[in-house]
Amino acid sequence: MPQDGAVLPYVYRVTKYDPADRDEHGRYPGPQDIVSDHGESEAAYLQAVAAFAADAGIDRLAVREPGVPSLAHLGVTAAADDYGLGALFSNGLHGFHDGAEVQLPTALELVRCMLRESGAWCRLEADGTFEVHVGWDQYLYVCTSRPSEEAVARTRALGLFPENLGASPYAVETESPDVQRPADAEFWSAVAWAVASGRAGLLEETYVEGASPWHPLSGDTLGNVRAGLVPRARLAVWPALSPDVGAVLGSLPDEGLVEAVWQDADGRVHRALADEDDHAELTVRMAGATAAALMPVYADEYVPLFTAVLPDSDGVVRARWRTEPTPDDRKWAFLKSLRAGQVVAGTVIETAPFGVTFVDVEGHVGIINIPELSWRPLAHPSDVVSVGQRIHAQVLGVDAVRGRLALSLRALLDDPMKELTAQVGTTVLGPVTKLVPFGVFVRIEERENGLEGLVHNSELTGPQVGDPRFGIEIGRALRVKILDVDLERRRITLSQRQADPEV
């Protein structure tokens, strides 16, 4: 069976235009009207679609990629009866969403709406085996997985003209180099984190091309907003609206189109497209608003914080439309491609005084905390790395919710403590580096940042009364015996009392 979005082998263009009237450019300059007659011709189109559906054994179709003209521009009034969909879907546009399944009679009424150019449009499909596309000027395309001789004959009998084509001009294009982010549990955790941190506060929902309701987000409203979204909607997360409505209105551009979004005193969010001639009306419309923002409408300026598409209830994203990936989306896709233990290459871009090293890994920032720079003690990251240095590091963990990448340099280095395990039981001479209430630390490697071990008070020699460390000071050389090397807890246990006497 052909997969979703595959090109079906039999494609028929059905029109009321006689091919004999076609000019040398392929157009039909004949007397036929290019709009629906709301009568016999329109009925013939619907009967033709029904005949092709019968040949294919189809009795229900799914709405795909629905769209309507945007009504957000000031001065534009809503189409009567929800673009003619009011009688077809009990909840209006909310029922006209990608993946909505309708019985064949309802599908035929959708074809009627599109023939009448009511504004609503969609592809109608069934199981990857049957498709109906309505084009401009009464051009209709039927794509099917099997020959339709009877339907072709029936179409001709209805006074229409079916023609075989290689493909429909309205066939969907699904190829995209970017990975689509799904609005799954991880996405909503990221939204909750962005809202809690004050980074986000507004959600744009697009379930029909041309209709984008906006929802204010807070910790209290996030659950209800999520539950009320229309299936397969595209989502875009934005910063919160500004409470300084006056400043927002004052920033209206002298020319060009903008989208104003504002929240009224009842908490409802409104939107309107406006140009320089609409500023006065927009100011009146926004009177009493409690918060507002100006949103970009041009593709090169439209950059929300991050985006996603709602998956179906089984977690699979079946909507073919996609969101334009933002920098955050690209970072998410990159992080999702990584696994703990993987080795990545990067360039050191900063060494912070508090011990964190920032590394550019394919345009994304990874962090190496100072303990992960070396097995040995460090005073500053610059003891090991320098800005501009190219390094390899191991992925410790990926936090796609907060967008964090934790790396380790030392994981790729030999652990010097492992070599010391072979020296357990031997005696070494080393300087005292630190005095603590429960003992002293002694460096047992002949290097400035060598490994250190603890000599507990009970393993020190000297007076038994008072401070057992009496007479010991930092820098003094002590002869100590290595009693234990614990790799898991990173501890070296030493004893002065058990050390072998100097030969």
Image (cartoon, rainbow, N blue to C red):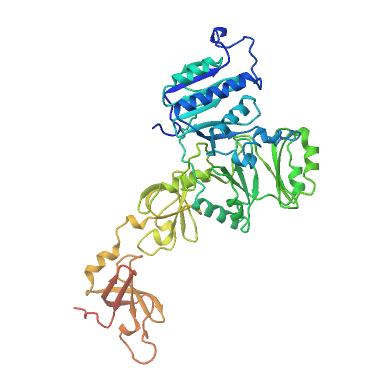
Image coords of residue 343 (percent x, y): 35, 50
Residue occupying image coordinates x 37% and y 84%: 469
341 horizontally vs 190: left or right: left
Split into 4 quadrants, where in the image is the N terminus?
top left
362 horizontally vs 68: left or right: left
Query: Which quadrant of the structure image shows residue 396?
Result: bottom left
In the current view of this chain or complex, which residue is farthest to the left? Answer: 503
Above or below: residue 284 compared with residue 52: below
Looking at the rendered structure, the number of numbered marks drawn on it comes to 0
Looking at this view, is 22 or 209 the one in front?
A: 22
Looking at this view, is 109 or 273 the one in front?
A: 109
Split into 4 quadrants, where in the image is the C terminus?
bottom left
Looking at this view, is 39 or 247 the one in front?
A: 39
Above or below: residue 375 compared with residue 83: below
In the current view of this chain or complex, which residue is farthest to the bottom? Answer: 465
Asked if residue 89 can be seen in this view, the reply is yes
Query: Which quadrant of the structure image shows residue 145?
Result: top left
Image coords of residue 110 (percent x, y): 59, 31
Residue occupying image coordinates x 63% and y 19%: 40
280 horizontally vs 46: left or right: right
Query: Which quadrant of the structure image shows residue 463?
Result: bottom left
Image coords of residue 399 (percent x, y): 46, 54
Above or below: residue 317 compared with residue 397: above
Asked if residue 161 can be seen in this view, the reply is no
Image coords of residue 79 (percent x, y): 70, 33
Residue occupying image coordinates x 46% and y 44%: 316
Looking at this view, is 421 or 88 the one in front?
A: 88
